[in-house]
Amino acid sequence: SAVISQKPSRDICQRGTSLTIQCQVDSQVTMMFWYRQQPGQSLTLIATANQGSEATYESGFVIDKFPISRPNLTFSTLTVSNMSPEDSSIYLCSAAVSGGNTIYFGEGSWLTVV
Amino acid sequence: AQRVTQPEKLLSVFKGAPVELKCNYSYSGSPELFWYVQYSRQRLQLLLRHISRESIKGFTADLNKGETSFHLKKPFAQEEDSAMYYCALRGAQKLVFGQGTRLTINP
């Protein structure tokens, strides 16, 4: 299994600013992903964080708005840039543990943009 | 393309009654299917996966490739089963979720 820690857990942000969310996994993982869960909605995959290379973004998500880094096997960041109220959401980090097929999730980062 | 459909957004049953949460999928390859659960104010957690063929907290789910379904079942619902349930499909590495079903167990 894996324990995934995210920081911050919650924040209130001003419109037009950017915020970086950090994700730390306690064991080596093969894949790391970032999801968004808007109020009352399901989880939508934003991108796959690739170690040492550019993230792979899903349709509707772009690097300029959601830059992602993954400098090593256990750490990743997601930045939400130039935020607007529509970006108010829970952002979740997830990871697949090496040798397994289960994907684990962090507790999420609740962002409110005012 | 991967797609997961959970037709019921809300499901309410009485304690002790059987529960079935429906999940249908669309995927051209060989899918891996999961059920995740999110209790109030808690993180999303894995409930069960089709590969394991296990029963967790009394829940079971059988993959039916002919009907492309992975319905979640429990013979006797308990109040602590009230939660949000998500069916998810993993194909080509990434995990795609259905819209979720909010299950409420009435006393």
Image: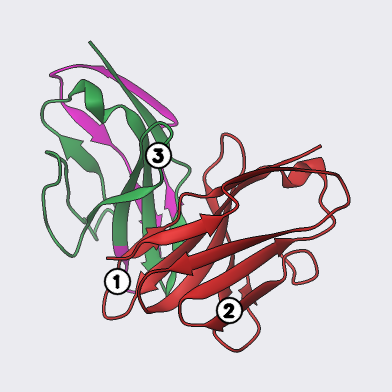
Chain colours: A red, B green
Alpha carbon separation for disc pair 2 and 3: 26 Å
Q: Is residue B103 above or below residue A48?
A: above
| Magenta stretch, residue numbers | B4-32
- Residue at image mark 3: B42
Q: Name the chain under label 3.
A: B
Q: Is residue B77 above or below residue B61?
A: above
Residue B44 in magenta stretch = no
Q: Residue at x 24, y 61 (%)?
A: B65
Pointer 3 and pointer 1 on the same chain: no
**Local secondary structure at mark 2:** strand
Q: Name the chain under label 1.
A: A
Instruction: Left or right? Give the position of A46 relative to B48.
Output: right
In terms of depth relative to the viewer, which is nearer, B8 or B107? B107
In terms of depth relative to the viewer, which is nearer, A62 or B63? A62
Q: Whole-percent x and y of residue A110?
A: 61, 44
Q: Whole-percent x and y of residue B57?
A: 14, 40
- Residue at image mark 1: A101
- Residue at image mark 2: A70
Q: Whole-percent x and y of residue B25?
A: 38, 55
